[in-house]
Amino acid sequence: MKEGSTEAPIRHPLAWREPEFLETDNIEAELTRVFDICHGCRRCFNLCDSFPRLFDLIDESKTGELDSVSPADYAPIVAACTLCDLCFMTKCPYVPPHDFDIDFPHLMLRARAAQFAAGKVGFWQRQLGQTDRNGRLAGSLAPLVNWASGCGNGLTRPLMESVVGIHREAEVPRFCARTLVAEAERQPLEINSEAPAAGRKAVLYATCFVNYNNTPVGLVARRVLAHNGVDIRVEHPGCCGMPQFEHGDLEAVAAKARRVAAALAPALDEGRDIVALTPSCALMMKFEWPMLLPDNTEIARLSQATFDICQYLVDIAANEGLASGLGPLDGGIAVHLACHARAQNMGPKAAEMLRLLPDTEISVIERCSGHGGSWGMMKENFEVALKVGRPVARQAAEAGRRWLASECPLAGAHVMQGIERLEAGEADGPDRAYHPIELMARAWGLDGKAQP
């Protein structure tokens, strides 16, 4: 057996339909096996809070070894995993095909699936994950909802904290009065037939977040693609299921995967690429769905045709070339590489894309922001999330760049909160976080304001 794997990591399909997948004794035995290996290695001590919790639990036990730790005490370790995949992708030397066969995030997912099956996921956690429903309802009352959920609202945020469990200081997504799909229908685009990539066709998969919470980013991405000759249309057949994935509701994720894949199949028949605006959604479509439903041919086909938005623009640049008129951005850019973009195993595409800007200095931040979807908003996790993300906030503040970008909008907002928490006078940071595609649009002069 090798000391560590020297081969590219691989992942196995999730055997979530097998009876032993949810059996408590089976899960506890696998957790004990993996935790004992982690205890002997400890390379992941500085990633998410799962590993410090595990190592503290062992170090403070009677023998200082895992044999004196009760499996009943494993729950906080499972709860702290944000499913960022960085341990699997960047740190662990024992991932498959190594004989130890460790996939820490998917083991945490399995433990959560058992918790969900046992009814241990709370009502409000499940309701927060209903992103399509929430987006439709909140969008109809967007000004009121945005006022009520705004940080600093001393009337409503303490109530949200006590009832829903969202920390009163956590930045939460705002809602748009009109969806990206609706705005795209109202704003027809002219395709640049002179662009080198003219003839490409794609569907912009809106994703819940952009469709309901950040319509301007979707409109900007649409302009950028049209300017580069892409015949683009916007679709949102439904949520990718990442919120349910985080809770371990794998049956719901599988249902969403089947539905979205079937809805996008006609676009694939037309020869269109699928471009996702949020890294978590691209990750689900490319990797997690095929591991849940490895025999579904529509999902396999969709997986091969899906691009992250930054990846897609880099692909255009590499193959046909970009449209003319791209200018520099004065002051330089600090770009945070989102965990779920890194987990797509495609390289640092946001940084590659921004390096296409002429005469623009780029600083790259490669650590986890600590947010982890809705995880970092909850009152029991918010301070931990800020602690995990503090190195990112410090790098962003000290980079000395005018612009800050993150591929993940939730991570970007969380990093900004981390910058605000830095000690006064430690560093002056940027005033907001942008999606990288917004900065590309600005460099092309395509960032005209659209009313959400």
Image: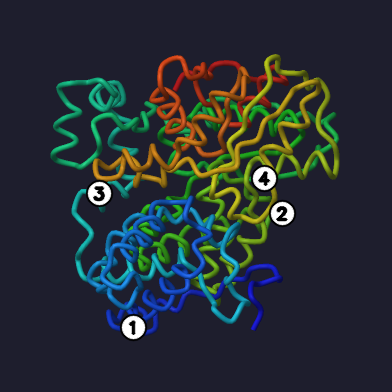
Identify the residue shown where x is 48% and y is 19%: 426
Question: Label 2 to label 4, Cα distance in Å?
Answer: 8 Å
Question: Label 1 to label 4, Cα distance in Å?
Answer: 44 Å
Nearer to us in this view, 2 or 260: 2
Q: Position of residue 109 (x, y in %)?
A: 39, 65
Q: Position of residue 144 (x, y in %)?
A: 25, 22
What's the residue type where badge 2 is placed? Answer: Gly
Residue 26, numbered label:
1
Q: Is residue 126 above or below residue 154?
A: below
Q: Position of residue 157 (x, y in %)?
A: 20, 28
Question: Which residue is labeled 3 in the image?
Answer: 127
Q: Are marks 3 and 4 in contact (CB under 8 Å)?
A: no
Give the quarter of the image for residue 69: bottom left
The nearer-to-camera label among 2 and 1 is 1
Question: Which residue is labeled 4 in the image?
Answer: 202
Q: How many residues crowd around disc 1 within 10 Å: few (fewer than 14), some, or many (20 or more)?
A: few
The nearer-to-camera label among 1 and 4 is 1
Q: Are marks 2 and 4 in contact (CB under 8 Å)?
A: no
Question: Label 3 to label 2, Cα distance in Å?
Answer: 37 Å
What's the residue type where badge 3 is placed? Answer: Gln
Q: Is residue 199 left or right of 52 when viewed as pictured?
A: right
Q: Are marks 3 and 2 in contact (CB under 8 Å)?
A: no
* Mark before the other along the chain sequence, 2 or 1: 1
Q: Is residue 155 above or below residue 164?
A: above
Q: Are marks 2 and 1 in contact (CB under 8 Å)?
A: no
Q: Is residue 28 above or below residue 280?
A: below
Residue 271, numbered label:
2
